[in-house]
C-alpha cells in the first residue's frame, strides 16, 4: 500500500466527513425548533464542515504555495465563523429572543 | 465539464430564488441581507467562469461594502417598504416584462459558452492581448496588462467616475457648517436646558428629528437625554460583544496586509488597485462597525479622507503627463525607464494601480462616513 494511496484515502475521508457535517448543518438549519439551535447548526457548517473540507483539500494540494493559502483560509474561517455565530446569538439575546419553553433557566 | 454545468445550474437557481425572495420581502433589513447573498452567489459564478478579478470585486463590493451602505441608509429612513397600491403595479410589471423579453431576445444572438470559433476567440486582438502582452508588458496577469496598460485611458475614465461619486455623495449627505449652526441655534431657542453643548451631536440630532415630528417644545431636552442614553447603551453593547471586538482587532492587520498583497500582487495574480482599495475600505468599515466611527476617525480624520479622494486620480493623470514630458504619449509607460520599456511598464502599472487603490479606498470610506455621520459632522 503506497503512501499516495493512503493520503488519498485520508483526504477522501476528511472530505466526506466535511460534506456530512455541511449537510447535517443544512438539515439542522431547516429542522431545529428555535433560533439558537438553528444558529448552532449554521455555525457548524461554517466552522467544522469547512475546516474538514479544507483539511481534505490540504492533503491534495500540489506544492507548498497552495498549502499555505489553504491553511490561511482555514485559520481565517476558524476565527470568523464562530465570531459571527456568537455575534448573531448575542444580538438575538439582546433583542429578547427567548430560549424554547421547558427550559428551567428561561432567558438568562 | 458536467460538474461545472451542475455548479452553474445550481448557482443560477439559487441566484434566481434569492432575487425572487428579495422582491417578496417588505422588511428591508432582511432584503439587504439577501442582496448580500446575491452578491456572494454572483461572485461564486464569476469564479466558476474563471473571472477571478471580477469575483474579488463582486465579493468585496456586492457582499461587503454595499451591504453596509444599505444598512447605513436604512438607519436614516424607514426600514419597511411601503405597500404599493395594486393598480400602480401594472406599469412596473409591464416595464419588467418588456425588459425581460428584450433581454431574452437579445441573448439569442450570444454565441454558445466556450465555443472556439466565436468572434471573441477569433479576433486578432485576442491574440495580441494574450500572447504579445507577455513580451510587450511582461505582466503575467493579462487582465492587469489590458486594464492598466492597453486600456489605460478607460481605467482612468472609470476612476474619474468613482471620484465623481466620492465628491457627490458627501456633498449631498453632509450638512454644511452654516446649516448645522442654524439647527443648533434653533434647538437652543426652543429648549434652554440642553442640546447646545458641544459634544452632544447625537442629542441635537435626535432633538431635531423629534421636534420635527411632535412639535418643538421639548425637542432639545429630550434629545440630550436620548443622546446620553444612546452612549451608555452603546457602552453596554460594546462590553457584551467582547468576542467580536477581539476578533476584529486580531483580523484588522491581516485585512490591511491582504489589501496590500492584492494591490502589489495584481500583476501576477488576480487583483489590482480597485480590489485592494475596496478591501482596505472594508477593513476600516468593519472596524468602525464594531468600535464606533470615532475610533476610525482618530486614525483617518475626515478632512484627510476627503483630501485623499483626488490624490489617486491626480497620481494617475500626473503619470500620464509625466510620460508626455518624457517624450511619449499620454500614459505611455515605456518612457519611464529609458531603454527598458518592460521595466517602465512595470513601474507604470504599479503607480496607476496604487492611484486607483487610493482613490477607491478614500471614496468608499468617505461615502461611509457621510452616511454614518449624517448630521453629526460639521
Image: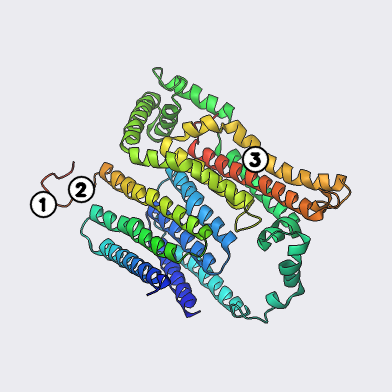
User: Is residue B168 among what the camera can see?
Assistant: no
The reply to whether dot 3 and dot 2 touch (C-beta < 8 Å) is no
Name the residue carrying label 3. B309
Look at 28% across and 54% down and name the residue there. A39
Expressed as whole percent of the image width and height from the top left, the position of residue B260 reads 59, 46
From the image, tell me which residue sits under label 2: A98
Give A88 or B196, whichever is nearer the viewer.
A88
Give the residue displayed 65% in from the left and 40% down from the top.
Answer: B309
Task: Indicate whether A25 appears above or below B175.
Answer: below
User: Could you confirm whether marks 3 and 2 are on the same chain?
Assistant: no
Q: Is residue B49 visible?
A: yes
Quarter of the figure that contains the C terminus of chain B = top right
Measured Cα–Cα span from mark 3 to mark 1: 57 Å
Instruction: Give how far apart the Cα atoms at labels 1 and 2 are.
Output: 11 Å
Q: Are marks 1 and 2 in contact (CB under 8 Å)?
A: no
User: Residue B31 at x, y = what percent?
Assistant: 41, 56
Q: How busy is the neighbourhood of tag 2: few (under 14 within 10 Å), some, or many (20 plus)?
A: some
Front-lying residue, B234 or B56: B56
The subunit letter for the residue under badge 3 reads B
Chain of residue at mark 2? A
Q: Which residue is mark 1?
A: A102
Toward the right, the furthest residue is: B327
Residue placed most toward the observer, B18 or B11: B11
Which image quarter: residue B251? top left
Q: Do marks 1 and 2 share a chain?
A: yes
Measured as percent of width and height from the top left, residue B297 is found at 52, 32
Q: Say few, some or many: other residues with alpha carbon within 10 Å of mark 1 (under 14 / 14 to 19 / 20 or more).
A: few
- The picture places residue B274, in percent across and down from the top left corner, at 62, 51
Depth check: give the residue in front, B4 or B344. B344
Does dot 3 land on a helix, a strand or a loop? helix
Amino acid at each position: 500500500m503506497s503512501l499516495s494511496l493512503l493520503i488519498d484515502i485520508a483526504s477522501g475521508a476528511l472530505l466526506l466527513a466535511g460534506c456530512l457535517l455541511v449537510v447535517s448543518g443544512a438539515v439542522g438549519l431547516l429542522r431545529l425548533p428555535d433560533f439558537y439551535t438553528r444558529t448552532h447548526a449554521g455555525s457548524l457548517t461554517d466552522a467544522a464542515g469547512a475546516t474538514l473540507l479544507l483539511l481534505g483539500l490540504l492533503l491534495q494540494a500540489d506544492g507548498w504555495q497552495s498549502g499555505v493559502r489553504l491553511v490561511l483560509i482555514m485559520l481565517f474561517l476558524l476565527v470568523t465563523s464562530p465570531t459571527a455565530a456568537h455575534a448573531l446569538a448575542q444580538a438575538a439575546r439582546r433583542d429578547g429572543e427567548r430560549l424554547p419553553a421547558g427550559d428551567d433557566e428561561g432567558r438568562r | 465539464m458536467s460538474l461545472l454545468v451542475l455548479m452553474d445550474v445550481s448557482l443560477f437557481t439559487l441566484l434566481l430564488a434569492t432575487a425572487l425572495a428579495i422582491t417578496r420581502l417588505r422588511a428591508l433589513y432582511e432584503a439587504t441581507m439577501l442582496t448580500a447573498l446575491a452578491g456572494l452567489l454572483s461572485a461564486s459564478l464569476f469564479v466558476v467562469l474563471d473571472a477571478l478579478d471580477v469575483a474579488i470585486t463582486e465579493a468585496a463590493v456586492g457582499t461587503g461594502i454595499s451591504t453596509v451602505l444599505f444598512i447605513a441608509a436604512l438607519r436614516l429612513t424607514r426600514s419597511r417598504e411601503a405597500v404599493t397600491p395594486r393598480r400602480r403595479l401594472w406599469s412596473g410589471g409591464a416595464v419588467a416584462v418588456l425588459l425581460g423579453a428584450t433581454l431574452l431576445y437579445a441573448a439569442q444572438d450570444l454565441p454558445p459558452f466556450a465555443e472556439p470559433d466565436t468572434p471573441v476567440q477569433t479576433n486578432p486582438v485576442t491574440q495580441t492581448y494574450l500572447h504579445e502582452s507577455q513580451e510587450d508588458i511582461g505582466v503575467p496577469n493579462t487582465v492587469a496588462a489590458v486594464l492598466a496598460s492597453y486600456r489605460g485611458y478607460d481605467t482612468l475614465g472609470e476612476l474619474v467616475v468613482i471620484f465623481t461619486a466620492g465628491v457627490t455623495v458627501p456633498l449631498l449627505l453632509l450638512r454644511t457648517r452654516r446649516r448645522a449652526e442654524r439647527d443648533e441655534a434653533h434647538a437652543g431657542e426652543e429648549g434652554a436646558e440642553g442640546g447646545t453643548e458641544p459634544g452632544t451631536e447625537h442629542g441635537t440630532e435626535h432633538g431635531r428629528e423629534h421636534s420635527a415630528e411632535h412639535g418643538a417644545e421639548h425637542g432639545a431636552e429630550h434629545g440630550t437625554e436620548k443622546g446620553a442614553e444612546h452612549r451608555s447603551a452603546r457602552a453596554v453593547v460594546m462590553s457584551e460583544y467582547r468576542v467580536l471586538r477581539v476578533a476584529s482587532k486580531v483580523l484588522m492587520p491581516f485585512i490591511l496586509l491582504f489589501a496590500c498583497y492584492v494591490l502589489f500582487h495584481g500583476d501576477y495574480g488576480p487583483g489590482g488597485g480597485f480590489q485592494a482599495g475596496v478591501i482596505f475600505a472594508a477593513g476600516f468599515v468593519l472596524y468602525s462597525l464594531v468600535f464606533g466611527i470615532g475610533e476610525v476617525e482618530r486614525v483617518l480624520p475626515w478632512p484627510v479622507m476627503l483630501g485623499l479622494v483626488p490624490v489617486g486620480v491626480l497620481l494617475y493623470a500626473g503619470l500620464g503627463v509625466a510620460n508626455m514630458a518624457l517624450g511619449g504619449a499620454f500614459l505611455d509607460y515605456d518612457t519611464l525607464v529609458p531603454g527598458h520599456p518592460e521595466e517602465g511598464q512595470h513601474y507604470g502599472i504599479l503607480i496607476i494601480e496604487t492611484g486607483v487603490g487610493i482613490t477607491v479606498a478614500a471614496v468608499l470610506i468617505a461615502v461611509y462616513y457621510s452616511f454614518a455621520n449624517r448630521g453629526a459632522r460639521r
